[in-house]
Image (spheres, grey):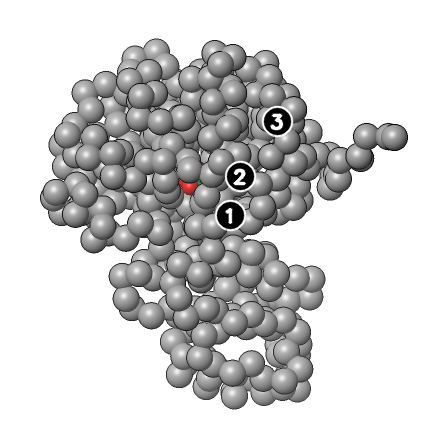
C-alpha cells in the first residue's frame, strides 16, 4: 500500500501531530535549523530553535515581521526557565507555578548570550510553557536533540489574524512550512503576557486567564502598560486585521446602522455580521453568532473572523462584547482588529 499523501496548501504540508514519527521528524527539523508550525492551546505557532539565530531569522522572513518585535520562547516546563532567564522575581515564580503549562507568558531578564535573536536583542525574554499535548511532545522531543527552547510567534503573516486551525496556517505562508495538525485550538486567543522584569508586574496583553486570577496568584495588583512599556506587536493598536474593514458597534447602534443601510444597498451586499443579540437580516452574504460565553467566544473568534472575511465582503460589523472582565481578551482583539 502507498503511504498516505499529506495534504498540502501552497507549499505547506499538514501532518498528523499525534503521529510519533511525525513528531520525531519535526523535532529533527527544529534541531537542524528548520521551521515547524505547531498547535498550542491558544493559537498555532511558527517555531524555530530559539538559540539558532539563522533559524529565527527564517521566522521573521516568513511572517514579514519587523526585526525589532521579540518572539516568545516556548519551553517544556518551569525547570527550563533558568536556561533563558536570570534574577527571577518571586512574583514570576508564583505565576509560573499557578499557570504553567498554560496560556500565560512571563517577561523576564534574559540570560546573557542566549536567545538573542528571538528576543530581538532586548535584555528581556518572554517565556511560556504551552499545555497542548502536541506542543509538549514536540518540545520534549526537541529538547532531547539539544533544543532547549522553541521561539514561536503566532503562525500568521504580520498584522493578520492568528491561526487556530492547521488549515489556517497552511494558507498563510509562501515558505516551505511543515504544519503539525493538533485540531482546533481550545483557548483561541493568544496567551496573557505579564512583564515581570521591572520590579512590578505589568499586564502587556490580556488573555483567557483573567486579570483577577493573575492578580490573585501574583499576590499584588497588575499595572497597565505605560509609555515606557517594551514594544509588543500583539499590543500594537492595529493588529489581528481581516482583509475587510471591521467595525465594532454596541447592539443598539448596530441595529440602527443595519436599518439605515437597508437590504437593497450596494454596501449591504458586501457586508458580514458577527453579533450576539442583533438579528441577522435576511439575504446577508455572511454572518456568525457570537456565543454568550466569553471563553467559547474566544475559542471561536479568529476562525469566525476568517470565515466572515470571505471574498466579496468589504465590511464586517461586529457587536461589541459585554463590559464584563471575562471578555477582556476578546474585546482587546476586536478593538485591535477594528483599529
Ligand atoms: O499564545 C501565544 O502567546 C502564541 C502562541 C504561539 O504561544 N504566541 C504569540 O506570539 O502570540 P506573538 O509573537 O504573535 O506575540 C508575542 C508577543 C508580542 O506582542 C511580542 O512583542 C511579545 O509577545 N514579547 C515577546 N517577547 C517580549 C519581550 N522580551 N518583551 C516584551 N514583549 C515581548
Ligand atoms: Mg501574533
Can the viewer see residue 110? no
In three-dimensional space, the C-alpha distance between marks 2 and 1, rounded to whole angstroms, equals 7 Å
Identify residue for label 3: 20
In the picture, the quarter occupied by the N terminus is top right
Q: Secondary structure at mark 1?
A: loop
Q: Secondary structure at mark 2?
A: loop
Residue sitting at 59 percent across and 14 percent down? 32
Seen in the picture, residue 139 relative to 15 is either above or below; the reply is: above
Identify residue for label 2: 39
Identify residue for label 1: 185
Nearer to us: label 3 or label 2: 3
Residue sitting at 30 percent across and 13 percent down? 112
In three-dimensional space, the C-alpha distance between marks 3 and 1, rounded to whole angstroms, equals 20 Å
Q: Residue 171 at x, y = what percent?
A: 66, 44
Mark sitting earlier along the chain (2/1): 2
Can the viewer see residue 291? yes
Mark sitting earlier along the chain (3/1): 3
User: What mark, if any, has residue 251 been given in the picture?
Assistant: none
Seen in the picture, residue 73 relative to 336 is either above or below; the reply is: above
Q: Residue 292 at x, y = what percent?
A: 41, 70
* Figure quadrant, ligand 1: top left
In the picture, the quarter occupied by the C terminus is bottom left
Q: Residue 15 at x, y = what percent?
A: 67, 34
Q: Are marks 2 and 1 in contact (CB under 8 Å)?
A: yes
Nearest the camera: 44 or 254?
44
Q: Is residue 59 left or right of residue 283?
A: left
Amino acid at each position: 500500500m502507498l503511504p498516505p499523501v499529506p495534504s498540502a496548501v501552497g507549499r505547506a504540508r499538514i501532518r498528523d501531530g499525534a503521529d510519533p514519527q511525525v513528531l520525531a521528524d519535526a523535532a529533527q527539523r527544529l534541531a537542524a535549523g528548520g521551521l515547524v508550525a505547531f498547535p498550542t492551546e491558544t493559537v498555532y505557532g511558527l517555531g524555530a530553535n530559539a538559540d539558532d539565530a539563522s533559524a529565527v531569522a527564517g521566522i521573521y522572513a516568513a511572517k514579514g515581521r519587523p526585526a525589532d518585535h521579540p518572539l516568545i520562547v516556548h519551553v517544556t516546563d518551569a525547570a527550563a526557565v533558568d536556561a533563558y532567564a536570570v534574577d527571577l522575581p518571586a512574583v514570576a515564580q508564583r505565576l509560573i507555578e499557578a499557570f504553567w503549562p498554560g496560556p500565560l507568558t512571563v517577561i523576564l531578564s534574559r540570560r546573557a548570550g542566549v536567545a538573542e535573536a528571538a528576543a530581538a536583542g532586548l535584555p528581556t525574554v518572554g517565556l511560556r510553557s504551552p499545555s497542548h499535548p502536541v506542543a509538549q511532545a514536540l518540545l520534549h522531543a526537541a529538547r532531547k536533540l539539544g533544543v532547549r527552547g522553541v521561539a514561536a510567534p503566532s503562525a500568521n503573516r504580520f498584522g493578520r489574524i492568528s491561526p487556530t486551525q492547521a488549515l489556517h496556517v497552511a494558507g498563510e505562508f509562501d515558505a516551505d512550512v511543515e504544519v503539525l495538525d493538533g485540531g482546533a485550538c481550545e483557548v483561541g486567543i493568544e496567551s496573557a503576557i505579564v512583564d515581570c522584569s521591572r520590579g512590578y508586574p505589568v499586564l502587556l496583553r490580556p488573555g483567557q486567564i483573567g486579570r483577577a486570577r493573575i492578580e490573585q496568584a501574583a499576590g499584588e495588583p497588575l499595572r497597565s502598560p505605560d509609555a515606557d512599556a517594551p514594544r509588543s506587536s500583539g499590543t500594537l493598536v492595529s493588529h489581528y486585521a481581516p482583509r475587510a474593514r471591521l467595525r465594532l458597534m454596541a447592539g443598539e447602534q448596530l441595529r440602527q446602522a443595519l436599518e439605515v443601510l437597508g437590504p437593497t444597498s450596494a454596501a449591504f451586499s458586501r457586508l458580514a455580521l458577527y453579533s450576539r443579540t442583533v438579528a441577522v437580516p435576511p439575504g446577508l452574504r455572511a454572518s456568525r453568532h457570537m456565543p454568550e460565553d466569553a471563553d467559547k467566544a474566544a475559542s471561536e473568534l479568529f476562525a469566525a473572523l476568517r470565515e466572515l472575511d470571505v471574498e466579496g465582503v468589504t465590511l464586517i460589523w461586529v457587536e461589541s462584547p459585554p463590559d464584563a472582565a471575562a471578555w477582556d481578551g476578546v474585546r482587546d482583539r476586536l478593538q485591535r482588529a477594528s483599529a
